[in-house]
Amino acid sequence: MNWKIGSGLAAVVGLAAACVSGQASAKDLLGVACKSPPPAHCSGEACQPLLGDPGNATDPKTGRKFWLDYPCDLKPGDKVVFILNIHGAGSIGQWQRHYFPAMDYKDKYKLVVATPTAATSPTRVPGQPGVRVWVADADDAHLQNIATAVIDAVGKQNIKSFWLAGHSQGGITSNRIVCTDFFKSKVDGFLSLSGGRVGGVQMNPRFGPPKADGSPPDPRPGAGAMSAAALPACEFSHIYETGEHEIVSLPEASALAAQFGCAARVEKDLSDDQPGYVWDYARQGYPVWGMKARPGTAKTWVYPKCKDGRLVADVERLDKGHTEGLEPHVTEAIVKMMAAAPGGKVARGG
């Protein structure tokens, strides 16, 4: 994903005034005082001046900032779901935190959510500005440091499950690292937010940001091919979420579900009368890339009876594109599935 988040990126203006009042403090986790509602929470255009804030927590090894949200009633011995929430190309942690706002459900589902920001913005096209992306040499150690710090702070025995959640290039990055030596013994699930479907999905041939005049991008070489078709070298639960306009169609079967011996998928409808929080403020309007955040409907398909209780599910948001923030009911439905899925790799010594 290569999108622009507007002129507010460089200047964090009025942060304190925009935070929701009545926040209750709890004891610190990694030096971060807990607040409910979460700090620096925003909606719509009001988010733009807040996007440059790199976070409220610090990687103890590198000094890099990241966002940390956790339950304010967290007590010793409580079991938590740990989510490492990874943004897409051209984005930043604060936008990702509102695109997939798991933080809204941190108290209800005992979530610890860490949302970092990539370090570098390599130049892809000579003469054009660089784009912030996740790069192995620059970022993998940072992601590992965050995971280690959170696990140590909460306690291995208290990590009910550990999920990687990634939007767009963040999903590709999650897929790249999930079976590496560090993560394969820790990660119980991978949530792909328009970041490739394990087992494959055919992308819209004109997927991508619009041209400067708002017209669709030219078809890319290889566009329409099945993305993330290869099955992973390690085992984990998997949820794939996408906007309807991003793909040609969602397959009726899943190679990963077949590998886990799951039964035929079960469909459920969702409806939201509230929009998500954020969108691509500079380039909304091309349906494939995304409009201004709106209410909507979605379909979920869960493959039941998988081996060892693994979760395999697809979520398709109808009439939605790549950058429209997830709506409340969709977000909670995904979080609820994550919280109910089997875990325990970290607690078993990962």
Image: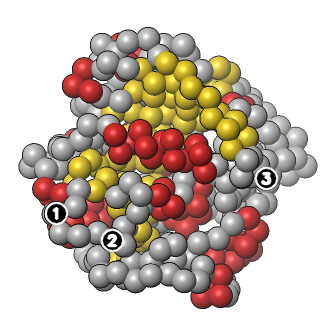
Q: Which residue is mark 2?
A: 73
Residue furthest to the left? 349
Residue depth check, mark 1 versus mark 3: number of the one nearer the observer: 1
Sequence-first disc among 1 and 3: 1
Residue furthest to the right? 213
* Image point (69%, 66%), residue name: 43
- How crowded pointer 1 is (Cα within 10 Å; few <14, some 14-19, many 20+) is rated as few
Camera-nearest residue between 81 and 169: 81
Q: Are marks 3 and 2 in contact (CB under 8 Å)?
A: no
| Coordinates of residue 166 in the picture (x, y in percent) | 47, 48
Label 2 to label 1, Cα distance in Å?
12 Å
Secondary structure under tag 2 reads loop
Q: Is residue 51 above or below residue 167?
A: below
Q: Which residue is mark 1?
A: 77
Q: Label 3 sits on what residue type?
A: Lys
Label 3 to label 2, Cα distance in Å?
35 Å
* Image point (54%, 13%), residue name: 252
Label 1 to label 3, Cα distance in Å?
42 Å
Q: Is residue 156 above or below residue 75?
A: above
Q: Label 1 sits on what residue type?
A: Gly
Q: In the rendered view, does 328 fall on the left or right side of 104?
A: right
Camera-nearest residue between 148 and 218: 148
Secondary structure under tag 1 reads loop
Secondary structure under tag 3 reads loop
Camera-nearest residue between 164 and 145: 164
Q: Which residue is mark 3?
A: 292
Query: Which numbered dot is residue 319?
Result: none
Q: Label 2 sits on what residue type?
A: Asp
> Quick check: can you spot residue 118?
no
